[in-house]
Amino acid sequence: MEASFPMKQIMDEEGRLVDPSYQEQIDEKLVQQLHYHMLRIRTFDRKAISLQRQGRIGTYPPFEGQEACQVGSALALGEGDWVFPTYRDHGATLTFGADMVRMFLYWNGRQEGCVAPPGKHIFPAAVPIATQILHAVGASWAEKRKGTDRVAIAYFGDGATSEGDFHEGLNFASVFQTPTILFNQNNGYAISVPIERQMNSKTIAQKSVAYGMPGIRIDGNDCFAVYFETKRAVEAAREGNGPTLIEAVTWRTGAHTTADDPTKYRPSGKGKDIVDPLVRLERFMKNDGYWDEQAVKTLQDKLNDEVETAVKGMAEFPAPNPEDLFDHVFAVLPPQLQEQKEFYLEFLKG
Amino acid sequence: MVMATKMEAIQAGRTSTKVMTMIQAINQGLRTMLEADETTILLGEDIGKNGGVFRATEGLQDDFGEERVVDTPLSESGIIGASVGLAVNGFKPVAEMQFMGFVYPAYDQIMTHVSRLRMKTMGRFSVPMVVRTPYGAGIRAPEIHSDSAEALFTHMPGIKVVCPSNPYDAKGLLIAAIEDPDPVIFMEPMRSYRATRGDVPEEKYTVEIGKGALLEEGTDLTVIAWGAMIPLAQKAAKAAAQLGIHCDVLDLRTLYPLDLDLIASSVQKTGRVVIVHEAQRTGGLGNDIISSINDTCFLHLRAPIGRVTGFDVPVPFFALEEHYLPTVKRITQQIESVYRF
Ligand SMILES: Cc1ncc(C[n+]2csc(CCOP(=O)(O)OP(=O)(O)O)c2C)c(N)n1
């Protein structure tokens, strides 16, 4: 099985193109876009970790190491497409156009963080594992019914493939031939459980066979492989050829969340040889004459400013409003709940 | 009448005790049963090598092996469904649901099989298993990590529900749950995991399932609570005492079956009741408690029964959780208003 799903790579760890057929499609604009977004979300991610340490936001799940997966896939989508992220995919949603202030708010326990910019089809992060896969199937099914060429992408981890919702989602997608991209980030661990304990199959991509859909295994730290293979799946879906399962093999550099201690379960040397996806792209840029030290410095300063401004935006955001506990549960507040609300607001006054 | 937990230990003449947190007491309870009964098997996500996300199972895989302390795939329905098969075939599964908000994928298995296998096979098959699960809000956890879903299970026939509030009860009830011939949901107030410390005997002992405890004695009003609400109920009772209102504080400890005798004897004495739970109000267990009081104490009541509960909304993101959760102030005010009725 493993042999049927070789890991597709376009750029190797030294930043050299191993598949020269992509030479022409990899232009200045694409390279700069990938680099800009990967650096941007890393800047966000590291800031979020430090805010958590200072007690300024809650528990936070870092995605460092997975930037190529998240940026490469998000850039392969079109403006009107749908994104169904997990709690670890805010790198993808930020790239797709989510608001950074709201992202910080989300991790600071604010439901305002779930509100997508108007017109943006970005679902709130799914916390219950694998549940969002079915939502992506449904939303893309709706697009198909409406006769548009929009698609939906569902992000999920390796652990998610053990939940029933994963299998139900793939089956629905293939039975109804929905335009869905099933984007798996295989980062080696589901909290403490390594992939070889999570499943007996050697790849995640091979699970596509059981559902009669195309599946592909890619090097998830190669932003070009992620971008072009996601794009291929998106185009197939747009043309009415149904879903694709993508397994992007990557690595979670840090802890599962800021409340987790990976030294308890991850052998200390493990993963140390993996070349960081951003470093890999930088190597490519240096090899191929895209690297401008001064421009990158300027960009980093600009991104630091953007992130600091967003942190300020979070801090200055209106305080949590207790009325929001009640007001958004239903379209119209039922009398029973209205009464509870009035009681509580009265209580707060006294 | 069941006495405060510390007293029980002293009365039983146990001397070898250790001060520990609730999470340590749970760990001890699991260890005790792994030692005492080789059919005990622990299953769950991240419970082995990692020792559980709250460290409830710390060290157990090292000492009892991977066959008995099992890191499962990430599948709640899988954990519970497989536990049914293990349980009917000679094992005592103790399954961990990482947070109560993640028990829902397993609800089907619990509702349609765990709870009714004994009945429909007229006792030929039974499911002696325990489902441990941290529950409750108040620790700034991410979304869905703060649910308090006891009423979904007290409503479910064929399953017992227990919920300790302190380290002593946690160990004793856990051992009783594992030894129980029927399935038990074991709810662990995560807010109290490290916040409460107490004397815990090092030996094996049980706290009887179905028995509550009278934690404070008063004459004017009965406060009924469990789990994470107990420390708040006790503080409110103290505040009420300053106002001259003296309360019984009942810790139910078991939510199904209820200790109806304990509730009746206290309410018949005081004639006034305030029930505290952090779960939503509608369909909350408080309503069943009120019904039981209606059945046994109607002519003793001197005021309508008060409730301090969560509101009928999903448990909010943590920025608003303090507004959702009962507080000492809300409980104290409710005590006062019931008393002054
Ligand atoms: C239904 C459910 N069960 C358990 C959890 C607790 N939990 C949160 S993340 C996680 C591991 C997920 O692993 P994976 O799918 O590989 O994604 P990753 O976190 O590695 O991105 C677990 C068990 C949950 N969120 N939802």
Image (cartoon, coloured by chain):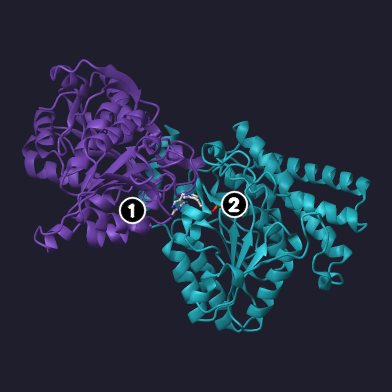
Chain colours: A cyan, B purple
Of A166 and B291, which appears nearest the observer? A166
**Residue at which label 2 appears:** A88
Marks 1 and 2 share the same chain: yes
Tell me if B261 is positioned left or right of A19 in this view: left
Query: Please, is residue A24 above or below residue B202 in the view?
Result: below
Residue at image coords 33%, 34%: B228
| Percent x, y of residue A302 | 83, 45
Quadrant occupied by the N terminus of chain B = top left
Disc 2 beta carbon < 8 A from ligand 1? yes
- How far is mark 1 from mark 2, CA to CA? 37 Å
| Percent x, y of residue B56 | 38, 36
Q: Are marks 1 and 2 in contact (CB under 8 Å)?
A: no
Amino acid at the residue labelled 2: Arg
* Secondary structure category for the residue under label 2: loop
Query: Please, is residue A131 above or below residue B216 in the view?
Result: below
Of A207 and B213, which appears nearest the observer? A207
Checking the image for residue A28, the label placed there is none
* Secondary structure category for the residue under label 1: helix
| Percent x, y of residue B134 | 37, 41
Q: Is residue A281 visible?
A: yes
Residue at image coords 42%, 44%: B146
Of B152 and A218, which appears nearest the observer? A218
Checking the image for residue A336, the label placed there is 1
Give the mark toward the camera: 1 or 2: 2
Crowd tier of the residue under label 1, counting other residues whose Cα lies within 10 Å: few below 14, some 14–19, many 20 or above: few
Crowd tier of the residue under label 2, counting other residues whose Cα lies within 10 Å: few below 14, some 14–19, many 20 or above: many
Tell me if A27 is positioned left or right of A258 in this view: right
The answer to which quarter of the image holds residue A116 is bottom right
Quadrant occupied by the C terminus of chain B = top left
Q: Chain of mark 2?
A: A
Residue at image coords 8%, 38%: B297
Q: Chain of mark 1?
A: A
